[in-house]
Image (tube, rainbow, N blue to C red):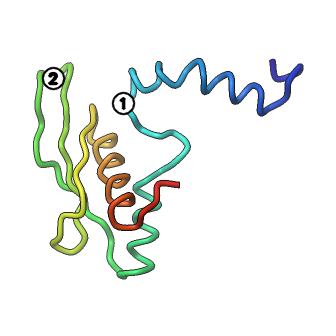
Amino acid sequence: MYLDGGFEAAKKFIRCEFTKLTEKVCGTEDFERDYKTRLQELVQKSLKETPRYEVLAEEGPPHDRQFLVCVKIKDDVWAQGRGRSKKNAEQSAAKQALEMKYKETN
């Protein structure tokens, strides 16, 4: 496919065919965007603070655990996120914070 249609055609095919599989296995984490890094960059630039993540809850059996995490700036909770791992929950919380506070995800 790459040889016939080029990089964009191959990329489009992979996204179309494998997005649901990766979301099923890894949650809704966006592999092209690191929301935690983007949030940290914006917060440090505008507020001179570093976001902190705190696990609020762990639910479910060990083989199917769900985490609820909040992201805090100073002592203020900016957003919460859920995920099948702490990392995914933190990414979700960072994405929510970006959408709510900075009106962006890209």
Up/down of 79 relative to 42, above or below:
above
- Where does residue 91 sit, x and y in percent of width and height? 36, 47
The quadrant holding residue 11 is top right
Label 1: which residue?
27
Nearer to us in this view, 29 or 63: 29
Task: State the residue at coordinates (25%, 63%).
Answer: 52
Task: State the residue at coordinates (27%, 31%).
Answer: 84
69 horizontally vs 9: left or right: left
SS label for mark 1: loop
Q: Which of marks 1 and 2 is in front?
A: 1
Q: Would you call the spot at circle 2 few (<14 residues within 10 Å), some (14-19), or many (20 or more)? A: few
Task: State the residue at coordinates (17%, 70%).
Answer: 76
Q: What residue type is labelled 2?
A: Pro
Label 2: which residue?
62
78 horizontally vs 17: left or right: left
The quadrant holding residue 8 is top right
